[in-house]
Amino acid sequence: MDSEDDESYSANSEMRYISLELMKLAQKSGKSFREIAREYMENTALLQEMIIGGDEASTASKKKGSSTRENK
């Protein structure tokens, strides 16, 4: 396999792993998979903003009422 195939395989493998973990969380919490996945995506985007922008994203998300565990 070339590197493009390896990257595609890796991305698909990671997506399957994340999906399974989100399904487990949804089942445990009683929430729908869609709710859990949405929360995961919001938290992932927030983390990315925090890494790129430092503390500014953290302060802004608290004002918006972010769905991170920190604020619950």
Image (cartoon, rainbow, N blue to C red):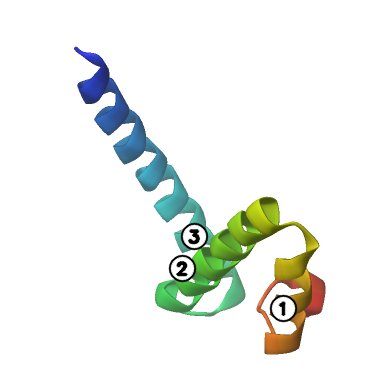
Query: Closer to the camera, 39 or 66?
Result: 66
Residue 67, position as x, y percentages in the image: 66, 78
* Residue at point 64%, 52% (across, down): 52
**Which residue is the site of mark 3?**
22
Q: Nearer the viewer, mark 1 or mark 3?
A: 1
Circle 2: element type: helix
| Mark 3, other Cα within 10 Å: few <14 / some 14–19 / many ≥20 | some
Q: Can you say which quadrant of the picture contains the C terminus?
A: bottom right
N-term mark: 3 or 2: 3
Query: Closer to the camera, 35 or 44?
Result: 44
9 relative to 58 in the view: left or right: left
Q: Which mark is residue 60?
A: 1
N-term mark: 2 or 1: 2
**Which residue is the site of mark 2?**
37
56 relative to 12 in the view: left or right: right
Residue 15, position as x, y percentages in the image: 37, 46
* Residue at point 75%, 57% (across, down): 54
Q: Using the image, determine if residue 45 lies above or below residue 72.
A: above
Circle 3: element type: helix
Q: Nearer the viewer, mark 3 or mark 2?
A: 2
